[in-house]
Amino acid sequence: MSDSLKIDYDVIIIGGALSGSSTALMLLRENPKLNILIIEKNPKFGYRVGESTVEISSFFLGKILGLSNYLNQNHLIKQGLRFWFYQSNENSFSQCSEVGSPYHVRLPGYQVDRSTLDEHILSMAVDAGAQLLRPATVKKVELQLGDLQKVTYQHDDKICVANGRWVVDASGVRCLMSKQLGWYRKNEAHPISSIWARWKNINSMEDLNFAQDFPDWEKRCHGTRWTATNHFVGKGWWAWCIPLKCGDVSIGLLYDERIVTLDQNLGLLERMRKLLNEHPVARRVMQNAEPLEKDIHYRKNLPYYSRQYFDDGIALVGDAAAFIDPLYSAGLDWVAYTTSAAVKLIMSERNNDDITDLLGQLNDGFIQSYDRWFNSLYLNKYFYIGEYDLMQIAFRLDLGLYYLGVVIPTFEKGRNFPVLPPYATANTSIIKFMCWYNRCLADIGKKRIEKNIIGKKNSNHFFQFNSYVANRLIILRLTMAILDLFKILILNNSLFKLNSNKSDGLSTTD
Ligand SMILES: Cc1cc2nc3c(=O)[nH]c(=O)nc-3n(C[C@H](O)[C@H](O)[C@H](O)COP(=O)(O)OP(=O)(O)OC[C@H]3O[C@@H](n4cnc5c(N)ncnc54)[C@H](O)[C@@H]3O)c2cc1C
């Protein structure tokens, strides 16, 4: 270890939101004597996206971090996913097709207010012994791998230096370290952008006037539609609608720049509203909606990744590591895996283990994982996302294979949470199958767009999707979805035309 630098901390964490505070908390549970500094830029967390949890992130928050009671008391219980399709903007509300469960879901999920949740976990980390500097901004990190890392930060107008054996970058989309190290790459194969805001005066689907106006629509669902993540979908776009415990509703638009051109003459909110107004369900829900001032956000070209995620002294976690697409709300799953991996790596080194092999496994695993999840789930998805017949099948398969390959193995391991996403290492045949059907469906979607026959099958369907459970019954349900996939491919003359261009996939190792 260098003589000139004195060790101040075992670990310095840049960013105290979910990824940073979870890493600190898990490290301190492993070893309460660790000396950890969290440097957080904001005096208080404001509105942030990442509000909908799915099976893995709920398991991580509830069972690994131990927040089940807190989540049940302070946030909303989520009722799965629900998709709404429309054929034309002249459809009536009840003609729009729906994919969703008539009952409540079987596994826990939450709609979380991130500002509240992140403050809570940060305070738990501080109670466990982490030191917090806030507001303070990290300006520069000088790495000496295998030795001490020198972190320069600004606090109360003063420039200060702290030395730590490890730096954990949890700076979110700023990606402080991957940019500084030249590891950062944009994912140009997926040009999606987003506009989002929080709203008040939203019409909840549970309001009596919905039931009065559409009695058959009301009758067919016995559960609570509103606390699902409701997805309004259209040609090349989708929007989430997430209610929060405080009464505000988070609504955001995601669109593929290759398919959707928004009116640049309009302000951000008007652009979003104009598109959402085309959709009869979104139109009804947002009839009287008013955005909360100062809570309007826009981000272009969302996805990116890193050429490397870990080294001897540095770990990237959460959004500071990579981001793909929020369609299936997997951002917090990524937080769960990357923070768990960082904890494993740091604890191994602090326990004087040789970390060479682990470093290799983690870097290879996360690089593979990004490629696999991206190519199998998201590549060109927006070409068919608004098509009821195609997306309904994709949803059943995507979610079913998530259960089979990710949810079930993770739940079976209990508190022994995996440090690598399960599909990162094995199951290549499943990933190949996912890439294949996603390509086939995207090809059909592209052809429909070319022929201008998009959305023609979008009216008057209700696919009663009973939520999956984490047992082997999933195989039966997946078999049924695969049979329906083949039917769709035959109907669209696509089964034997598998000439889809494989080379448009992403390989982050290139
Ligand atoms: C449009 C959109 C919708 C999404 N929806 C979902 C969803 O429904 N479900 C889901 O699971 N995920 C979703 N995500 C992803 C999710 O938001 C992120 O994965 C998650 O918020 C990442 O948390 P984080 O702690 O890594 O980063 P952040 O929450 O961004 O926190 C980073 C922290 O670092 C601090 N910081 C930054 N720079 C510095 C610095 N130099 N010095 C000190 N501190 C610094 C910041 O102040 C901030 O507090 C969505 C993402 C987007 C873009």
Image: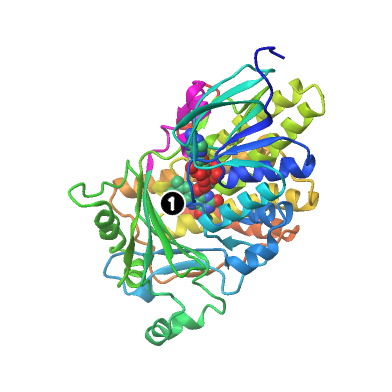
**In front: 465, or 342?**
342
| Residue 172 pos. (x, y %) | 51, 39
Judged from the image, the secondary structure of the residue bearing numbered disc 1 is: loop
**In front: 62, or 304?**
62
| Residue 59 pos. (x, y %) | 69, 55
**Residue 406 in view, yes or no:** yes
Q: How many marks?
A: 1
The answer to if 211 sits in the magenta stretch is no
The answer to if 187 sits in the magenta stretch is yes
**In front: 145, or 331?**
145
Q: Is residue 355 left or right of residue 363?
A: right
Look at the image and give the residue range highlighted in magenta.
173-192
Up-down: is 276 above or below 202? Answer: above
Residue appearing at x 63%, y 63% in the figure: 71
Amino acid type assigned to the residue bearing label 1 in the image: Asn
Q: Residue furthest left?
A: 265
**Residue 105 in view, yes or no:** no
The quarter of the displayed image where residue 2 is located: top right
Q: Is residue 465 left or right of residue 70?
A: left
| Residue 239 pos. (x, y %) | 40, 57
Q: Residue furthest top?
A: 3
Residue tagged 1: 492
